[in-house]
Amino acid sequence: ATLLQVFHVLALLVVVADAGGDGIKVSSMPFAFSLRQLAWAGGKAHSCDSKCKEACLDFDTAGPHSWGDARIQRRDVCLAGCGCTGSYDTVLANTDAGVVLVSTDGGKSWIALLDKVRTAMRAGEQFRAEQIHVSHVDPTFVVVLTNTTTQWVSHDGGSNWQALRLSTPLQGERTIASWQWHPTIKEWAIAESRMPTTKRGDAPARLAFYSKDSGNSWKLLASSIEQCRWAEQPHDGSHSIILSRHIDGDKSRDLELVSSEDFMATHTVLIGHGAIRGGPQSAEKVIIHLGSMFAIVREAVSDAHNHQLQLWLSMGSPGGGVSALPGV
């Protein structure tokens, strides 16, 4: 079953690559610039076998220690075989020039996103597209991030678009550096924003925000962050978030790693002051990737002038804390 599901995902690539009477292929670059990203969205023909989808989600719970990016990828392969991910006919392409093109016929014809949103743009506004993000829950939900404070969101697979702006009374209107749709709740998302501070020489202030309405409104999640990820456990009813941030603000190099299930109203320290299960007091580098957390920690050896580096990691759920690798 797994092989068939993987083949189904790859088949989407083959269909699009061979689309069109002239034999248009992705590798032939039928655009003025090279492609940097392709994304499949759920268009008008989008359909999903609900029983098959439920079986995928039930199978997902078989690995109780699986969470984060790795779990999402395994689940998406399964859901693709149920027709519950993006359809082959609705394709979004982002070029190296920052131009997004949308096709609703499997690559036979393309229309620029700019032409679809021109009437909704502010006077004199120009933008370069940076990233395309399709929801894992509902592939008709698509966000295109740009190099301005105006992003573009579609709720019908790219047929219609509206402006999306990250703005709060205290933080004002900000650019968005990264976006993450929630892995199980359709309208929830996390966004990271990095913008220069007003003082010359200061590092950019990086903030994390969350939205429960597809980006119509935002609330501040945390400041001085390095990484922020959903860490949702399948069917457990929680809405876990894990993030690394600078302990003493943006000027500090010392990082802490925390997890929260209530959007940082409360949190558990995995690395930092008061870390659970004897975790280190700070880290020089934290990487959250594919269901694992890695941290590089500097430890004193014999005196304040001698140190050694240790590698700490967690392969399970965020609540399990982190452990040092012996002999590293």
Image: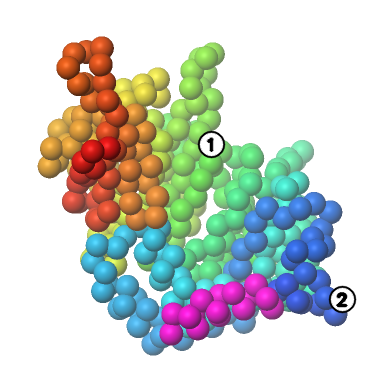
User: Relative to residue 236, is residue 34 drawn left or right?
Assistant: right
Q: Position of residue 59 (x, y in %)?
A: 31, 78
**Residue that sits furthest to the front in the current view:** 327
Query: Was residue 97 drawn as part of the magenta stretch in this picture?
Result: no
State the SS at label 2: loop
Count of numbered badges drawn on the protein? 2
1 or 2: mark nearer the eye: 2
**Residue that sits furthest to the right in the current view:** 22
Q: Earlier in the sequence, mark 1 or mark 2?
A: 2
Tell me what residue is drawn at x 48 percent, y 80 percent: 3
Tell me the magenta residue range.
Answer: 1-15
Q: Position of residue 263 (x, y in %)?
A: 30, 47
Q: Position of residue 79 (x, y in %)?
A: 45, 77
Specify the color scheme.
Answer: rainbow
Q: Residues within 10 Å of mark 2 (few under 14, many from 20)?
A: few
Tell me what residue is drawn at x 47 percent, y 73 percent: 77
Q: Position of residue 149 (x, y in %)?
A: 60, 40
Q: CA distance from mark 1 to mark 2?
A: 43 Å
Does residue 316 lie above or below 310 as drawn? Answer: below
> What secondary structure is the magenta-colored segment mainly?
helix
Q: Which mark is residue 174?
A: 1
Q: Which mark is residue 22?
A: 2
